[in-house]
Every structure is written in structure tokens, then in C-alpha cells.
Image (cartoon, grey):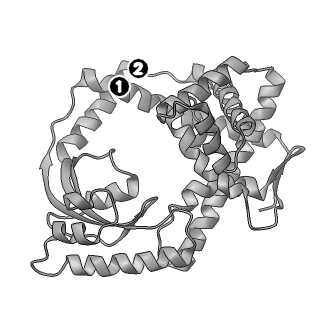
């Protein structure tokens, strides 16, 4: 449901372009679902699920298959919800101007430091998208945001008591948490690489991890010699970081390792990482006044998601939805 929450993160929009290559599906396209009279094609589901599918890092083929099925189902549910909302948008006469779409395109370019519009269009083409198709995608996002503001916005109310309770929980967790100083070794693999390449890179990473655990092994020297990442010259040094800075899979491992411990290979979009935590230290909680805007936004998102789930469920009950996937 998070993909539908009001408030477009323009910096993330360009990141979603990576899913465009899935439109060039090798499988014969077929109908995944029918929503009233609208068809959702299998290629649309594959395109929507592509970023998450590329992050599957379980070496067990059976579990990979199970995760793929779940991610495809989630993507299809998301698309069904969007189709239902599009029907509501049309019925309510909600619109967006060309100028508003222009502004959002400019925001995306600026957030990604792309000053040349032609370069931006070339990037879209490289991902299998035309500018017209991308603008249509942005227009739909604007319209859905407006629908959600209309239908869900009035229900989302944040009280001072809510904020103080959220801060108390944050401060309690923060006082128990820490930040870590870590190093890593990267075995690079393209997120769209075939499974054989992913598996080969995993075996290579496993061998490096075993080497890193040898008594007396200098991890920083090993990183300089074996890492394929930009931090290799610095011995794989990532410096100090708190939770919420690194990608979730990377962060989860980093904060469960003991000082001096070396991890099993961890998959991200860059490849397989072997982590070592050098040391950790406690961190002081940020003040209530500084945290208040972040907490307010967090609570608003959480409440929006709750009401959104209810709203989409109501739309789905009234619609004719035939899932064929």
C-alpha cells in the first residue's frame, strides 16, 4: 500500500525508471487481471515488480521462487488499486494541467542532477520509455495524489499527544541504539544479470568472506585487493552511520554483527557485499523540537496507509475484479 500514499517523492521517481526494461518481456504477454473493463497485462505486473525482484538475494531456488510469486502478487494488487482509483478520478473529474506535469518532470531532473532535457530523454529511451509515456505516468501519480487528499486527507489527524507518544518511543529506541563504523568488500553484479551470474558472484563472495575470517587477516588490505566498489582504495571504509542511512538489507546485517565480525554475503543492487563492523558507539536522541516535523510526517504516512487500505478495499468490493495470474 505504501506505493499509493499521498506525497510524491520526486527523487524516487527517476529511480523507478529501472523497471522500464521489464516492458521488454521475454515471455509472451497475457492478461493478469481484468478490473471492470480494464485489462492489466502480465508485462505491466513484471514492470512494476522489477525493482523488488532484482533485490531478491536468497540463494535457495525454492525460496527465490516463493518470493517472486509474492512480489508479483503485491505488484498486481497495487495495479488493481490504481485502476480502481483511476475510475474514481474520472468519475470525480479530477484533472492535472500540462504545466503541473512540466514542473514535476523538472523536479525529477533537478533531484537527479540532470540539467540537459535531451540527456533525460535519452535516459528514458534507454529504459524503454518515451517522454510521452513517462509524462503520462507522472500525470497519473498527480491525479492519484489529489484523489487521496480528497478521500483520505480529512481523516488524517495528528494530535500533540500522538507526537509526544511517538517521540517517547523514538527516544527510548534511540537510547538503546548505536551507530557503527563498518567496512565492506563488494563483488559487483548487475541487478538485471541472469541468475547464473548472480550465483557465480555469490560463490566468489562466499570465498572472500571465508578469507576475511582467517585469523590475523587485515580486512582493509583485503578490501583494497579484492573489492570491486569505489571504496576499495580506502580499504572498504564506510565510516560511521546510523540506522536509516544504508539500504535495508545492508543495514539489517550491519546492526546485527558484533564488533570485529564478518558477515555472509549481502545482496544489494550493486552486487554482493561482505561487511565487517569495526566498532560501535551510542548516540544521543535528537530533541523533540527537531524531530517533530519528521514524526508528524511519519504518523501521517502511517495513518494514510491505514485509511488507504480501507478505501481501496471498499472500491474493490464494489468493482468486478477477475484475477488471472
Residue located farthest toward the left when viewing the structure as drawn: 216
Relative placement, left or right, of 95 versus 58 is: right
**At x 27% / y 23%, what residue is drawn?**
290
- How packed is label 1: few (under 14 Cα within 10 Å), some, or many (20 or more)? many
Relative to 292, does residue 82 appear above or below in the rendering? below
- In the rendered image, the residue lying farthest to the right is 37
**CB under 8 Å between discs 1 and 2:** yes
Q: Is residue 28 visible?
A: yes
Task: State the mark number for residue 245.
Answer: none
Front residue of this view, candidates 320 and 47: 47
State the residue position of label 1. Answer: 163
**In the rendered image, which quarter contains the C terminus?**
bottom right
Where residue 313 appears, as percent x and y from the top left, is 70, 41
**Residue 9 drawn at (x, y percent):** 52, 33
Vertical order, 196 against 291 (above or below): below
Q: Is residue 116 left or right of residue 29?
A: left
Give the Cα distance between marks 1 and 2.
7 Å
| Residue at 82% from the left image edge and 27% from the top image edge | 90
Residue occupied by mark 2? 159
Q: Residue at x 58, y 45 (%)?
A: 16
Q: Secondary structure at mark 2?
A: loop
- Depth check, front residue: 229 or 296: 229
Is 150 located above or below residue 312 in the figure?
A: above
Q: Is residue 55 left or right of residue 65?
A: left
Viewer-proximal residue, 317 or 5? 5
Is residue 8 among what the camera can see? no
Residue under the point 43% across and 28% down: 297
User: Can you say which quadrant of the picture contains the N terminus?
Assistant: top right
Residue 104 picture location, percent across and down? 60, 26
Rendered location of residue 110, percent (x, y) = 50, 29
Amino acid at each position: 500500500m505504501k506505493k499509493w500514499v499521498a506525497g510524491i517523492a520526486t527523487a524516487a521517481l527517476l529511480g523507478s525508471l529501472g523497471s522500464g526494461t521489464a516492458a521488454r518481456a521475454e515471455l509472451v504477454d497475457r492478461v493478469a487481471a481484468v478490473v471492470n473493463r480494464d485489462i492489466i497485462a502480465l508485462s505491466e505486473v513484471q514492470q512494476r515488480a522489477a525493482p523488488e525482484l532484482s533485490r531478491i538475494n536468497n540463494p535457495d531456488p525454492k525460496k527465490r521462487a516463493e518470493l517472486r510469486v509474492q512480489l508479483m502478487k503485491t505488484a498486481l494488487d497495487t495495479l488493481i488499486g490504481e485502476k480502481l482509483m483511476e475510475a474514481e478520478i474520472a468519475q470525480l473529474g479530477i484533472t492535472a494541467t500540462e504545466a503541473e506535469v512540466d514542473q514535476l518532470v523538472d523536479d525529477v531532473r533537478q533531484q537527479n542532477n540532470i540539467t540537459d532535457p535531451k540527456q533525460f530523454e535519452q535516459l528514458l529511451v534507454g529504459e524503454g520509455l518515451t517522454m510521452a509515456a513517462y509524462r503520462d505516468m507522472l500525470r497519473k501519480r498527480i491525479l492519484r495524489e489529489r484523489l487521496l487528499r480528497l478521500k483520505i486527507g480529512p481523516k488524517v489527524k495528528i494530535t500533540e499527544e500522538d507526537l509526544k507518544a511517538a517521540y517517547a518511543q523514538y527516544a527510548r529506541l534511540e537510547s538503546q541504539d548505536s551507530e557503527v563504523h563498518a567496512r565492506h568488500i563488494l563483488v559487483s553484479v548487475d541487478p538485471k544479470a541472469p541468475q547464473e551470474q548472480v550465483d557465480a558472484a555469490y560463490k566468489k563472495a562466499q570465498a572472500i568472506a571465508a578469507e576475511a575470517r582467517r585469523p590475523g587477516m587485515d580486512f582493509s588490505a583485503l578490501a583494497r585487493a579484492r573489492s570491486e566498489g569505489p571504496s576499495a582504495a580506502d580499504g572498504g571504509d564506510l565510516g560511521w552511520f546510523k540506522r536509516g542511512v544504508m539500504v535495508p538489507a545492508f543495514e539489517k546485517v550491519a546492526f546485527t554483527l558484533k564488533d570485529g565480525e564478518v558477515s555472509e554475503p549481502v545482496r544489494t543492487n550493486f552486487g554482493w557485499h561482505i561487511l565487517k563492523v569495526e566498532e560501535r558507539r551510542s548516540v544521543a536522541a535528537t530533541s523533540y523540537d527537531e524531530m517533530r516535523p519528521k514524526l508528524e510526517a511519519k504518523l501521517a504516512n502511517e495513518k494514510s496507509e491505514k485509511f488507504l487500505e480501507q478505501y481501496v478495499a471498499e472500491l474493490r468490493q464494489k468493482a468486478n475484479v477477475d484475477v488471472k495470474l
